[in-house]
Amino acid sequence: MISLKNLTKVYGHPDTSVTVLDNLEIDVATGEILAIVGPSGAGKSTLAQCINLLERPTSGQVIVNGEDLARLSERKLRVARRRIGTIFQSASLLSRRTAAENIALPLQYLGVTPAETKARVAELLERVGLSHRANHYPFELSGGQLQRVGIARALALRPSVLLSDEATSGLDPETTRSVVSLLRQLRDDLDLAVVFITHEMDTVLHVADSAARLENGRITEQGSLVDLLTDHDSALGRALQPRLSPADPGAGSRAWHVTYDSRTVPADWLQRVSADLGEPVALLAATIQSIDGTSTGNATVGLRAPEPLAAAAFTRHGLRAVPREAAAPAVQPAPRITEELQWA
Ligand SMILES: Nc1ncnc2c1ncn2[C@@H]1O[C@H](COP(=O)(O)OP(=O)(O)OP(=O)(O)O)[C@@H](O)[C@H]1O
């Protein structure tokens, strides 16, 4: 488990100081993957550096397994830092060393015996599915394979926290999915708390259990993905939703934006609402996400019933619904067009 308490980072001198991180409160439980998202300049890199203590926070705590690492002396910090493994965007491997030798580095620095190192490296290579590439050099590996070596190296010292700093940025979608599914597998097998920092909203849906939005150095929103995706008022939830292009509801009908999750709403909700109101409900657009066994739905439907009757029927069936003109724009900008659009 990792907890950030009142974490603040200020750069510069008192007269020219910039507060880059402002009193952050973040908890990531063992077995949880928290995605931290935010636009360029929000403070994501600074947060990553404060989490793995490459930068000392100006104030506040970084508590890993009950100990505040931010207060440790340099000597103690060197040891404590092993509890946090970091994977970076570019994997940052040494080009003149093989995959196995790169993974062995942290163990060698620590003085682990060659026999133990060999066994541990073999185990790690197997975990990341690269036993057959042990003796390949970085230039002989694909982007996904490089990142897998980076992950194995980050796990070499058996950390309890894994910090991923834009680790999938720049990978193609298929490779991103395979790296993300490896991270989820490792989280399960090794009971890791994972902090996944990214600017890629579509990756968050595949990797995370929960998400936090960092903006101007502050956490403006955080919650479980299921809660965020079904909350009409959540800007982060909206930014996480896949793009929808609803059809026109037709003359005399009103379009409603509806969200729900399968914990409280049965899959045949459309028929139920239709039977309740005694009129057909037209499905104009819909998307369903499955997150840890819970499905969250986001749909636009059209119906003729007067607003109070329709609203009451949706509520009776456990759906959260708002007339489309009152909802956030149903057509979301496609992820990855530009960050400015994503956060508009
Ligand atoms: N050493 C520093 N001294 C002063 N200001 C800094 C320093 N490092 C970062 N900043 C400022 O802190 C803010 C946050 O920067 P940071 O790199 O953490 O953002 P980011 O969210 O990672 O951005 P990006 O996604 O573009 O990498 C920026 O305004 C940046 O100019």
Image (tube, grey):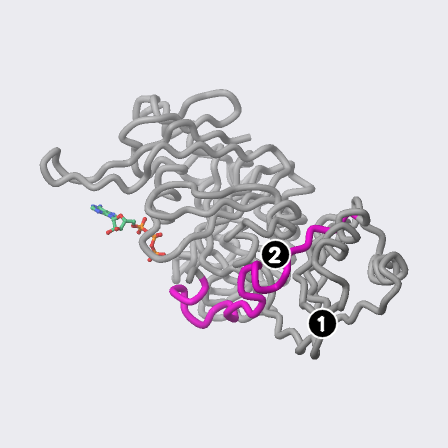
The quadrant the C terminus occupies is bottom left
Q: Residue at x 59, y 33 (%)?
A: 29
Q: Residue at x 52, y 32 (%)?
A: 27
The quadrant the N terminus occupies is top right
Q: Is residue 45 left or right of residue 152?
A: left
Name the outermost residue toward the left. 15
* Picture coordinates of residue 33, whole percent (x, y): 59, 44
Q: Which residue is mark 2?
A: 205
Q: Secondary structure at mark 2?
A: helix
Q: Where are the magenta residues, as a range?
A: 318-342
Q: Residue at x 44, y 32 (%)?
A: 25
* Picture coordinates of residue 272, whole percent (x, y): 88, 57
Query: Is 193 drawn above or below residue 280 in the view shown?
Result: above
Query: Is 209 drawn above or below residue 296 in the view shown?
Result: above
- Tell me the distance, in whole angstroms, between the alpha carbons under discs 1 and 2: 32 Å
Q: Is residue 34 left or right of residue 269?
A: left
Query: Is 116 drawn above or below residue 297 in the view shown?
Result: above
Residue 131 seen in the figure: no
Between disc 1 and disc 2, the foreground one is: 1
* Picture coordinates of residue 195, whole percent (x, y): 51, 43
Query: Is 122 drawn above or below residue 90 in the view shown?
Result: above
Residue 206 occupies quadrant: bottom right
* Picture coordinates of residue 185, whole percent (x, y): 67, 49
Q: Residue at x 42, y 67 (%)?
A: 341
Q: Which residue is mark 1?
A: 253
Residue 48 seen in the figure: yes
- The mark that comes first in sequence, 1 or 2, is 2
Q: Residues within 10 Å of mark 1 (few under 14, many from 20)?
A: some
Q: Is residue 335 magenta?
A: yes
Q: Secondary structure at mark 1?
A: loop
Q: Is residue 175 magenta?
A: no
Q: Which amino acid lies under the numbered mark 2 shown in the image of this protein?
A: Leu
